[in-house]
Image (tube, rainbow, N blue to C red):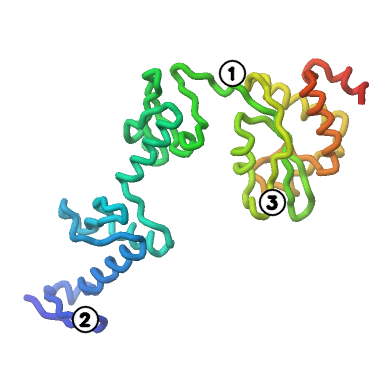
């Protein structure tokens, strides 16, 4: 009930059941092993043997750091095809723990929510919560137990500049982290070449959003010519509004100068308009 097949690629003989030969297109296990070993070397790992748990789709790999762990063979081959190294679970856990410690948190493990981009953390105050790994890395996280929400923690009013294929534009907005916001709003930073021109500190996020909305209303009322139509920037920016023509820089800068001097656009618009 068995036959011996000779692989036309590597020449190695393989024992196969006749039913497999008749009903399927059998693969050479030796070629498969060579392919997996080559993929492992490409990503800086070594295929040590079969999966300790006996799962045929998995194998035991040793990473460049010296740690060993089981990995799905297709994931290793996909990593090799993509040209990036295979991550070590142990090293990745250690890195996430270091990033959390730098922000005053302790990494506990997998998140309660079914999302691979989140982990479970414990704050210095003892409160536990899920948080995005990327947010923890940047420090863009607030403790729900003892911390401030975005509305109560310090924020900033910012002015940014971008170069679009059709025109040069400005973005006026608020954020507790303008540099991260700068990267976030661009589809292709190499093309739009965003730059943070200036920022003005505000004591709370609530006041920042009130000031920002008042500034946009002020510009829409007194200088509507500065507003850029969405069709000119939506294909290059991850936003739908708050974009102004570059020639409005002097006018908007004057608004921010007044803001830095104590002007509150939500309650003192009339007085400021008369001054300019």
* Disc 1 from disc 2: Cα separation: 69 Å
Instruction: Name the front one of labels 1 and 2.
Output: 1
SS state under label 3:
helix
SS state under label 2:
loop
Identified at 21% across, 73% down, the residue is 30
Residue 98 is situated, as x and y percent measured from the top left of the image, at 39, 36
Instruction: Name the front one of labels 3 and 2.
Output: 3
**Label number found at residue 192:** 3
Which quadrant does the C terminus fall into?
top right
Q: Nearer the viewer, residue 262 or 241?
A: 262
Left/right of residue 1 with respect to residue 201 in the rendered view: left
Identified at 44% across, 32% down, the residue is 102
Q: Is residue 62 above or below residue 2?
A: above
SS state under label 1:
loop
Identified at 75% across, 55% down, the residue is 165
Q: Earlier in the sequence, mark 3 or mark 1?
A: 1
Residue 130 appears in which quarter of the rendering? Answer: top left
Residue position marked by numbered label 1 in the rendering: 152
Residue 203 is situated, as x and y percent measured from the top left of the image, at 65, 19
Q: How many marks?
A: 3
**Label number found at residue 140:** none
Left/right of residue 229 with respect to residue 201 in the rendered view: right
* Disc 3 from disc 2: Cα separation: 54 Å
* Disc 3 from disc 1: Cα separation: 32 Å
Identified at 33% across, 59% down, the residue is 76
Dot 2 crowding, Cα within 10 Å, few <14, some 14–19, many 20+: some
Residue position marked by numbered label 2 in the rendering: 7
Which quadrant does the N terminus fall into?
bottom left
Residue 212 is situated, as x and y percent measured from the top left of the image, at 72, 27
Dot 3 crowding, Cα within 10 Å, few <14, some 14–19, many 20+: some
């Amino acid at each position: 009930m068995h036959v011996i097949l000779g692989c036309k690629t590597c020449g190695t003989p393989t024992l196969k059941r006749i039913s497999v030969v008749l009903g399927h297109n059998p693969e050479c296990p030796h070629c498969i092993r060579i392919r997996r070993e080559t993929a492992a070397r490409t990503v800086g790992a070594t295929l040590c043997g079969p999966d300790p748990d006996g799962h045929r789709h998995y194998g035991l790999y040793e990473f460049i750091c010296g740690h060993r762990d089981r990995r799905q063979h297709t994931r290793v081959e996909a990593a090799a095809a993509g040209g990036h190294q295979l991550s070590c679970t142990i090293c990745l856990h250690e890195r996430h723990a270091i990033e959390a410690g730098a922000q005053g948190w302790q990494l506990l493990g997998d998140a309660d929510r079914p999302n691979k981009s989140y982990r479970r953390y414990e704050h210095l105050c003892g409160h536990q919560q899920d948080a995005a790994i990327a947010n923890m890395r940047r420090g863009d996280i607030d403790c729900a137990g003892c911390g401030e929400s975005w509305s109560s923690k310090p924020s900033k009013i910012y002015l940014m500049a971008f170069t679009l294929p059709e025109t040069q534009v400005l973005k006026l907005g608020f954020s507790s982290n303008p540099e991260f916001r700068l990267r976030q709003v661009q589809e292709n930073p190499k093309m739009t070449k965003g730059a943070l021109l200036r920022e003005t500190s505000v004591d709370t996020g609530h006041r920042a959003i009130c000031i920002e909305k008042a500034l946009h209303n002020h510009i829409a009322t007194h200088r509507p010519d500065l507003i850029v139509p969405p069709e000119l920037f939506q294909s290059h920016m991850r936003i739908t509004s708050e974009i102004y023509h570059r020639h409005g820089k002097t006018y908007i800068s004057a608004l921010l100068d007044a803001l830095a001097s104590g002007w509150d656009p939500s309650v003192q618009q009339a007085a400021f308009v008369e001054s300019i």
